[in-house]
Amino acid sequence: MKSSIIELASDLIRRPSISPNDQGCQQSIAQRLEKLGFQIEWLPFGDTLNLWAKHGSGSPVIAFAGHTDVVPVGDEKQWQYPPFSAEIIDGMLYGRGAADMKGSLAAMVVAAENYVKAHPDHMGTVALLITSDEEATAKDGTVRVVETLMARGEPIDYCIVGEPSSAQQLGDIIKNGRRGSITGNLTIQGVQGHVAYPHLAENPVHKSLCFLTELTSYQWDQGNDFFPPTSLQIANIQAGTGSNNVIPGELYVQFNLRYCTEVTDDIIKQKVAEMLEKHQLTYRIEWQLSGKPFLTAQGKLVETMLEVVEKVTQNRPHLDTGGGTSDARFIALMGAEVVEFGPLNQTIHKVNECVKVDDLAKCGEVYQQVLSRILDHA
C-alpha cells in the first residue's frame, strides 16, 4: 500500500494544479478507478472539474472527499526543493499539496482500490467525490456536486474528508464539525470635506468609533460542549483619499465571524443591524455566507474512526471543531455523517510544504479499515 500511495501522491504533486485548474489529476485517478469497475461521472461546472466515482450499489454509501487544487506557491526561490518536484528527503514528501491534500487524496484512492480488489462484491457503495475548486471560491466544486446529488435523490450516508486534521502527531485530532463563517462588507456613509472646516463635513470614522467598539466587544455566546464561543475579527478597514487635509466621505469595514451552533447567520445579521441603527449610522452592508456550522456528534462513523485511528496510529484522537472551513460543510447538508481525517497541518499553505511518507501510509490503512468495518457489517 505504501509504495502505491507515494507513487500516486508524487504524480499528483508534479501536476501544478493551482485552483481551479486540475491539470489532469482527476483524469489520472479516474483511469485507475475505471479499471476496477468504478462508475465514472464527470460533473464540470464553470471552470471547475468534479469527479463522482462509485463502486457497488445501494446503502450504505460511504464516500471519500478531496480536492486536487492547491494554493499558489509564492516565491519559488524560497522553496528548498521545487514545489512541484515531489522530492522525498529523509522520509518526507515535499511539494505544494503534499499535506493539503494530494497526499491524503492518494491514500483514499489506494484504500478504495485495495478494498474493492479484496471485496469485489461488497455490500453498499464506495464513492469518491473529488473537486478542483476548494482552495479558491468553492462555488463550482463540491457544493454543486452536492446540489446535483440531492436533486436526484442520491444519498451519502458516511463521508471522510481528507483534510489535514492532525496537529502534533498523526491521529491526535479528528474533526467532527466546523464553525460557520460569515463576512460583512460594511460601508458607512459620511460627508467629505476639508479638515479645517469639520462643521461642513461629517467624518464617518469618528461617527463609527462607538459602533466598532460595541461590534468587536460584543459577546455572541458562550460556545458549547463541541464549539468554542463565536468570534469576530475585523479583516480590513479603509477610509480617506490619501490626503491629510480631506475628511473621508465613506468608511469601509470588512469583518468576519466564525460562529458556533448557538447562533445563526440570521441572528448575526439582525444584531449587527440593531447596532448600526442604535448608533444612528447611514450604511449599506453586503453579507457573504461561506458556510453554516455543522456537527457530527455521535454515530457509527465517529465511533469507527475513533477506534481505527487509535489502532493504526497508537494515538487516542480527540474530536475537534476548530480551524477554518472545508468542503465538509456542503456534504453535511445531505444529512451525512461527516468527519475530517488526514495528516499533519503544520506546513499547509507554507513554503516547503511536506508530509511524512509513513503518515500517508497509515492514513491509507485507516481509510481501508473504516471501509471494512462499515461495509463488511452493513
Image (tube, helix red, strand yellow):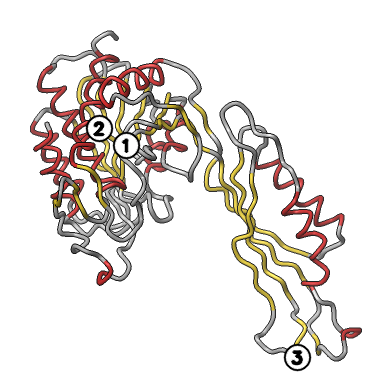
Given residues 18 and 121, the one toward you in this image is 18
Q: Amino acid at mark 2?
A: Cys
Q: Which mark is residue 342?
A: 1
- Give the amino acid type for the residue marked by disc 3 in the picture: Asn
The vertical placement of 271 against 184, above or below, is above
Q: Is residue 286 above or below residue 176?
A: below
Residue 374 is left or right of residue 116, and the answer is right
Q: Position of residue 308 (x, y in %)?
A: 30, 20
- Is label 2 in contact with label 1 (beta carbons under 8 Å)? yes
- Report helix, strand or loop for mark 3: loop
Q: Nearer the viewer, residue 372 or 90?
A: 90
- Quarter of the view holding residue 170: top left
Residue identifier under label 2 = 363
Residue 174: quadrant of the picture = top left
The reply to whether the C-beta atoms of the residues labelled 3 and 1 are less than 8 Å apart is: no
Give coordinates of residue 95: x percent, y percent. 22, 55
Please give the label number shown on residue 245. Answer: 3
What is the C-alpha distance between the residues marked 2 and 3? 60 Å
How far apart in space, not on screen, are marks 3 and 1 (Cα)? Answer: 54 Å
Q: CA distance from mark 2 to mark 1?
A: 6 Å
- Which quadrant is home to the N terminus? top left
